[in-house]
């Protein structure tokens, strides 16, 4: 099996200031950011969003449900209806889709409103 070329792969956003996400799309209910995770897959190619949504919800089986949105290309917002569902996902990993590892963290709420900033990941031994 050939080793994948990871030389050009980066898990950090290039933007320093983060970005805002529009939570009022299509008249949906208010999202509690305390119960949200933000994540990206370790791959250079696009993720098929609809297939990923179905697969992750099937794997996680949250009791109260999960809403998954694409915040921007390659960056996903996972909004859970209950904090125990979110904790189960955080503690139950690692998670993959289409042989790509999903990196996740809690959403950080900035002073300027709801923002999803840079993703910082520390790996031991990688």
Image: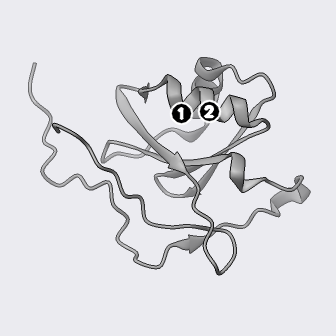
Question: In the figure, 8 relative to 14: above or below?
Answer: above
Q: Quadrant of the N terminus?
A: top left
Q: Nearer the viewer, residue 24 or 81?
A: 81
The reply, left or right, for residue 73 in relation to residue 20 is left
Q: Position of residue 32 (x, y in %)?
A: 78, 53
Q: Which residue is mark 1?
A: 90
The reply, left or right, for residue 11 in relation to residue 21 is left
The answer to whether residue 97 is seen in the rendering is no
Rendering quarter of residue 125: top left
Q: Which residue is mark 2?
A: 87
- Residue appearing at x 50%, y 47% in the figure: 105
Question: In the figure, 66 relative to 75: above or below?
Answer: above
The answer to whether residue 72 is seen in the rendering is yes
Rendering quarter of residue 95: top left
Q: Position of residue 10 (x, y in %)?
A: 26, 56
Q: Secondary structure at mark 1?
A: helix
- Residue appearing at x 34%, y 71% in the figure: 14
- Residue appearing at x 51%, y 23% in the figure: 92
Task: Please say if the residues under marks 1 and 2 sit with CB atoms less than 8 Å apart.
Answer: yes
Instruction: State the residue lying farthest toward the left.
Output: 2
- Residue appearing at x 91%, y 58% in the figure: 27
Q: Position of residue 79 (x, y in %)?
A: 70, 44
Are there few (<14), some (14-19), or many (20+) residues within 10 Å of tag 2? some
Rendering quarter of residue 50: top right
Q: Secondary structure at mark 2?
A: helix
Q: Nearer the viewer, residue 29 or 108?
A: 108
Q: Position of residue 115 (x, y in %)?
A: 61, 69
Q: Quadrant of the C terminus?
A: top left
Q: How many marks?
A: 2
């Amino acid at each position: 099996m050939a080793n994948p070329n990871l030389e050009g792969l980066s898990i950090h956003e290039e933007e320093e200031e983060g970005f805002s996400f529009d939570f009022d799309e299509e008249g949906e209910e208010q999202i509690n950011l305390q119960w949200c995770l933000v994540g990206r897959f370790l791959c250079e190619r696009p993720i098929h969003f609809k297939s990923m949504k179905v697969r992750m919800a099937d794997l996680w089986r949250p009791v109260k449900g999960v809403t998954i949105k694409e915040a921007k290309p390659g960056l996903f917002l996972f909004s859970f209806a209950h904090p125990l569902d979110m904790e189960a996902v955080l503690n139950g990993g690692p998670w993959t889709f289409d042989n790509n590892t999903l990196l996740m963290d809690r959403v950080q709420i900035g002073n300027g409103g709801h923002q999803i900033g840079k993703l910082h990941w520390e790996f031991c031994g990688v």
